[in-house]
Image: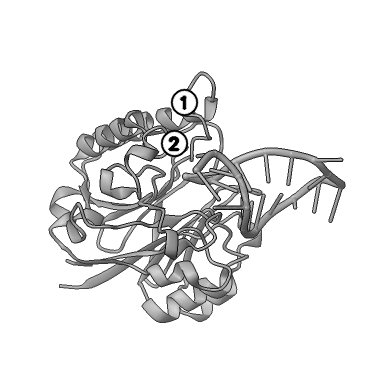
Amino acid sequence: MARLSIASWNINSVRARIGIVERFLRQEAPDILCLQETKVVDRDFPHAMFEELGYVHRMTNGQPMHHGVAILSKVPLREDRRHDWQDNGEARHLGVRLPNGILLENVYVPAGGDIPDPIANPKFGQKLRYYDRMTDWSAGLREPTVLVGDMNIAPLECDVWNHKALLDVVSHTPVEVAKMNDLMASHGWVDIGRTFFPAPQRHYTWWSYRAADWKASDRGRRLDHVWASPKLAQHAVGYRVVEPARSWEKPSDHIPMIVEFDW
DNA sequence: ATGGCTGGTAGAACCAGA
């Protein structure tokens, strides 16, 4: 049995936060780190720190200004594919095959704008269609797969600080939750986060920058997720988040998650 | 209490995030 740890973090600019990414890697030393919202084109990706810390296998899928994902790894990676589930050229996915043959999918789902109405707000419709296309892909998936990333939906009542107050807020609307449930059912995905922190436990991964004191108000949401194929999920031996990272210097508004497998 | 913030990029009374 070999142990492998995989971290995922929406970093909100990898260049602006290279210092806390290094702090995280020195402290937690995951084998693989999946980043979302890198906000950097591939030729400007800050490779040096990762190289120094032994993350010598790196794949990036960036674009100017927004979005962007990357996988930094101590173990070899083979690129599998880059899905464009919006079909608009945005850099939101990177899939790789690990040395043991397992697939790792790093996803950054669109936020969906402010208004939860696809007519008034086309971005919301795009988000729903993104889930539909992911579901089409997932339904045909036959291999053991780990899916991590910023799914931009907090599905359970206990995934938000106030269920009733957020029912009309993009990320927690019933139509979004239904789309996420369809996606989960299409492959039998196991929600590793809730396997290790069962509902109704408090478990958040994001807090707005706009709160005067994120910890005191604690108006969090669980937007970031780790999923595994049903049989693979039985090999998950650990899952944790690093909540103190939300208070590190110049933090991301998301915190990192780490999942460990024995296989 | 949907924004009181933040980053990228342009050089803005900008955009996007969620």
Callout 2: SS: loop
Q: Is residue A126 above or below residue A204?
A: above
The answer to whether A125 appears left or right of A138 in the picture is: right
Residue pictured at 20% horizontal, 73% vertical: A2
Q: Earlier in the sequence, mark 1 or mark 2?
A: 1
Mark yes or no: residue A78 visible. yes
Q: How many marks?
A: 2
Place residue A24 in its image quadrant.
bottom left
Q: Which residue is mark 2?
A: A170
The percent position of residue B17, horizontal first and vertical second, equals 53, 46
Q: Which residue is mark 1?
A: A125
Residue pictured at 41% horizontal, 32% vertical: A168
Label 2 lies in what chain?
A
The answer to whether A98 appears left or right of A48 in the picture is: left
Q: Is residue A87 above or below residue A81?
A: above
Pick whichever, A164 or A176, lies toward us: A164
Mark 1 to mark 2 CA distance (whole Å):
11 Å
Callout 1: SS: helix
Task: Tell me which amino acid carries mark 1.
Answer: Gly
Q: Quadrant of the C terminus of chain A?
A: bottom left
The answer to whether A80 appears left or right of A159 in the picture is: right
The percent position of residue A16, horizontal first and vertical second, equals 62, 65
Q: Quadrant of the N terminus of chain A?
A: bottom left
**What color scheme is it?**
one colour
Task: Tell me which amino acid carries mark 2.
Answer: Val
The percent position of residue A88, horizontal first and vertical second, equals 55, 32
